[in-house]
Image: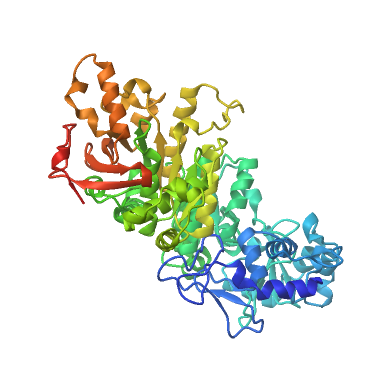
Amino acid sequence: MTRSEAAQEVKSRYAEYLRPAKKRGTFICPVPGCGNGTGADGDGLVLDPKAKNPYTLHCFKCGFHGDIIDLYQKEHNCSTGEAFNGLYKFFGISIENDRENLSAEPRKEARPTTTSLKAENGAEGNITAHEGNADFRAYYEACRANISDPAAQKYLASRGISEATAARHTLGYDPAARRVIVPAGNSFYVARSIDPAEKMRYRNPTGVSIELFNKEALYNESGRPVFITEGSIDALSVSEAGSEAVGLNSTSNVRKLLTELESKRTSNTLILCLDNDEAGHKATDTLIDGLQKLNISFITADICGKYKDPNEALTSDRAAFFADIRTAERRTSKPDNTADYIRRTMAAEIDKLKAQSNRKTGFDNLDKAAGSIYAGLYVVGGISSVGKTTFISQLADQMAAEGQHVLFFSMEQSRLEMVSKSIARQMYAGDPEHALSSLQIRTGESNEYVRRAIAEYTAGVEDRVSIIEGNFNCTVSFIGNYTRQYIEQNGTRPVIIVDYLQVLQADKDPDTGRKMTDTKQIIDRNITELKRMSRALDLPVFVISSLNRSNYLVPIDFEAFKESGAIEFTADVVWGLQLAVIHDDIFNKEGKVKEKREKVAAAKEAIPRNIELVCLKNRYGKSRYTAQFKYNPQYDYFEPVIEPAFTTAYAAPAWDAVQRR
C-alpha cells in the first residue's frame, strides 16, 4: 500500500480507533482533558456532515475539528509523521517503499506563496519531523519586518497588545497569509489569522511538536512570579501589564510544562490562570497535582473574572485586569493565608466533597454505617483466609456497576484470577444452583450459565474496571503515573485499589538516589506517598495490608498491622476484617492457645464463614462501627447480613439471630 492509499485507509477507519460513547453514533473524545462522551449527557465526538473532508470529526466540548490524524496528534502531542506511523502500527498497515521523508505525508496544508514566505518554505524544506531540526528563524526575521503593517497593528490593538509588547516578544506578520506570527522558540510558532472570516483562526507549522511560549520567563533572575496561561495571546496580555508569563499554547501541553520543570526547576512562584472553562479547570487540576509532586511553589488566581480568558479580560476592562494582576502577584508572598483560602477556594472544595457523598461501596450494611467513600487513603487489613482480596474485588465491581471507574493494581493475583472471581461471584449471586467456582472457570469449564454470567458482568461494569498486574515490580510512582495518564485520557477520577501493601516495592530515595532496604521504612514511606497521591489527585485509594501473626488470636487493632506505625496516623479510614469467632469467650481467657487455634482453624474451614468488618479509624464520620458478612470462598462472594442494630463497640454479634438478606 502506498502512503497516499494508507493515509486514506487510516482516515476511513476512524471508528475502529475510537471508543463508542453512550450516545449512539458518537465516540469518546480522546483529547487530553476532554473525555466528551464518557458521561450520560455528553455529546461525544461526531462526524461533521458539512465538512469537505468526509472523515472530519468535531467535538462540541473542546472544539476539536479535524480528521483522525489531527486527533492522534492532539491526543499524543506528536508530529504529523509520528501520528501516521502510530496509526499505521495500530491498524497493521505496511507501506510500500517506506523510504519517503516523514514530512511528505499527503496533508492538505494551506501554504502562502508570496515572497515573504520564501524564508519559511526554505526552512521547512529541511524539516525532517522525526529528527526535530526545524528552524524558523529566517521566517521570523522576514515576518518581523512586516509587524508595522497597518493591518497587523489594527489587529494587535484590538487584542490590547501594544507595539512595545509585540517588539519585546518578537512578533511578526505574514501579509500573504494575513496572520500574526508568535514565535515560541526556533522550531515552533503560532500563526493567528487577522481575517474574521477565516474559520481556522490558529495554525501551527506541520511536522513539529507544540512548544511553550516564552518559557524563559520561568527562570527570570528578578525572582518575579510567573503567570501560566493557556494561550500565547493570554500570556502577551499578562506581559502587557508588565508581568512575566508563559503560554502553554494548548491544554494538552500541561505535561510538557511539568517535564520542563522536572528537568530544570524554577525558584519563582507560578500563578496558574488558565481559561475560565471546563478544559481550563481540568488542565489546572493536572498542573496542581504535578507541581505539588515537584514541590514547586504556586498559587491559582482568577484574573479572568467573568470573562473567558485573560485576553478578553484585558480588552474588556484594562484597568481592572491590571489591578487583578497586581493582586495576584501580592498573594504570592502569602500563598497559604486562610482569608484568601476562604474567599477563593473553600466553597469549591465543599462542593467537591458534597459531590462525593453519593459514592458507595455497594454493601448496604457498610454504606449505612460508613456513609460514603471520600477521597482519601483507606487501609483494609486482615489475617489470611478472611477474604481481603475477594472483599475489595467485590467492592470494586459494585462501585463500577454504580458508575465509578476502578484501577485495581494486583501484585499477587493475575488478571485471569481476578476476573474469574468476578464471574464466579456473578454466577452465585444470580443463580447459586448452577454456579461454578473461579477455579473451574479458570480451568476452562464453560456452559450457558457461565456465558450468561460473563454477559451480565460486562454489561454491569462495562469498561470501568481495569486490572493492572504489578508482578512485584510495582511502586507508588508507577501507580501515580498510570493514574494521572488514565485521568488525562478518560476525563474521570478513578477509585484506586492496591493489593497489597507488603509487596509494594520501594521507589528510590529522592535524596540518595538509592532504594530503601529496611522493610518498615519502605512500608511507612509507601503509606505516606499513597496518602499524598489520594490528596493530590482527589480520589479514594484502598490498600490491603496483612497483619502480624502475633495478633491472629486477638481482636483486630492498630497493633496488628504489619511493620507500620504510619497506618494509624496517616490513613483516613482503617478497616479490619476478622473472623467473628474472635468474640468467643475463650479468647478472653489467658493461655488456652491450642483451643484458640482450633477455634480459628474451624472458623476458617466453615462455609460460609462469619466475617466482621471493624472500623478502627474514620475521618469522615462515625469513628468506630462494625458490619457483618457471610463469606463464601468457593464463589468469592461476600453477603451483607442485617443485624438488629449496628454495634459501635466490639461486643460479639448475635450470629444466631442474624437474618440473611
Q: Residue furthest top?
A: 591
- Left or right, 79 with respect to 102, comes to left
Task: Decide if residue 321 is in sight here.
Answer: yes
Percent x, y of residue 173: 72, 71
Q: As displayed, is residue 497 above or below residue 204?
A: above
- For the N terminus, which image quadrant? bottom right
Percent x, y of residue 267: 57, 39
Q: Residue at x 40, y 51 (%)?
A: 436
Q: As displayed, is residue 104 above or below residue 434?
A: below
Residue 177, image quadrant:
bottom right
Percent x, y of residue 105: 78, 69
Q: How many marks?
A: 0
Q: Residue at x 21, y 38 (%)?
A: 625
Q: Nearer the viewer, residue 57 or 429?
A: 429
Residue 623, image quadrant:
top left
Percent x, y of residue 486: 52, 53
What colour scheme has been applied to the protein in the rendered image?
rainbow
Q: Nearer the viewer, residue 352 or 483?
A: 483
- Left or right, 32 with respect to 360, comes to right
Q: Nearer the viewer, residue 335 or 5?
A: 5
Q: Residue at x 33, y 38 (%)?
A: 572
Q: Nearer the viewer, residue 522 or 178?
A: 522
Task: Decide if residue 376 is in sight here.
Answer: no
Q: As displayed, is residue 254 above or below residue 620?
A: below
